[in-house]
Image (cartoon, rainbow, N blue to C red):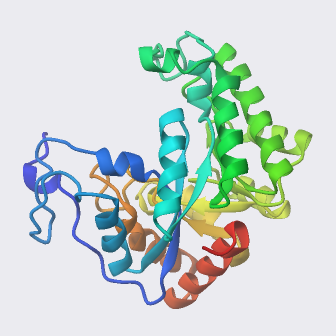
Amino acid sequence: MARSKGDRGWPASPEPLPVAVVDNHTHLESVESWEAPGWTRSDDGTAIDGPPADIAAHLARAAAVGVTRMVQVGCDVDAIRWTHAVVQEHPELLGAVAIHPNEAVLHERVREIAPDGRLPEHPDDLMAMGRFQEAFHLVELVARANPRIRAIGETGLDHFRAGPRGREVQREAFRAHIALAKELGLALQIHDRDAHDEVVEVLLADGAPDRTVFHCFSGDAELARLAVSHGWYLSFAGPVSFGPNDGLRAALREVPPSLLLVETDAPYLTVHPFRGRPNAPYLLPGTVRTVAEVTGRPLADVCTSLVATSEAVYGSW
């Protein structure tokens, strides 16, 4: 059944959190440009034609509910350049940059049907951007030049969208990003989709950076225990609130506050009950409240520990 216009808009702002927190991973360049027919009014009646007018509006709406700082992630060539600029304009933002594993496959012109059943498209503009090493050079330049870039990411392995040749490309790209993060003393944000064992294998073989974060953690309790044993950080997003994800909630219970982060991964993975609707940092409180409910901890304590852990990973804003 098609959604009505009334349930496709930006969700109403949630109740403010008792202590301000950090969105550990968001793609504001995509949030800013997200437009779709029917997304014309939020649930609270605020008239908006598409998303809020600009990044400042998103930041203000997030701050009003207690999401006052964010890590903006740029993981393609255009987004890296955008991130480099925006984190210097807005003190609420720190940055992470990388070539996403699926972008690495495109840069290397790999064309094969992956487990998702798709044959990757190779846009003309991406072809003009060069091979992976040329794109990765931009990551290096920005990470070295901009002190507000505090992480390399998102990088890792995506076995859902890559076949055998693509996985080889992703693995080598992952290793290059790991080496750069260690060289520069930056955190590492990992993209891990259907590749848990292989991601761990690479981290152990190459040596994980001191501050390694599994962004949008999707593993089970066993993987969570393994990550915790190595001192790796786990960041939970909207899916931890989805009804069927009991295994993910079991994993959450294995993570001590000192290794726990939260994120939106906006504009995707909107927290329950708004799944399928546009996402932005102002909706992070729903995930924070889920963390408190699942772990049985007071909400204010969860918020306070999330701030401390975020600052342990990324430093001060």
Q: Nearer the viewer, residue 316 or 229?
A: 316
The quadrant of the rendering that contains the C terminus is bottom right
Q: Residue at x 30, y 45 (%)?
A: 33
- Name the residue nearer the viewer: 291 or 43: 43
Instruction: Identify whether 171 is placed above or below 15.
Output: above
Q: Residue at x 69, y 27 (%)?
A: 170
Which residue does the image show at 31% across and 82% down from the upper left?
A: 15
Q: Is residue 28 visible?
A: yes
Picture coordinates of residue 54, whole percent (x, y) = 28, 58
Q: Quadrant of the N terminus?
A: top left
- The image quadrant of residue 254 is bottom right
Residue 254 visible in the shown view: no
178 left or right, relative to 47: right
Q: Relative to residue 247, is residue 141 depicted above or below?
A: above
- In x, y percent, where is residue 157? 66, 34
Residue 145 as seen in the image, left or right of residue 11? right
Q: Nearer the viewer, residue 295 or 37?
A: 37
Query: Relative to residue 134, is residue 232 drawn left or right?
Result: right
In the image, what residue occupies the spot 51% across and 77% down?
Answer: 21
Q: How many marks?
A: 0
Can you give x and y, in whole percent of width and height, for residue 231 in the image?
82, 64
The quarter of the picture where residue 213 lies is: bottom right
> In x, y percent, where is residue 291?
52, 73
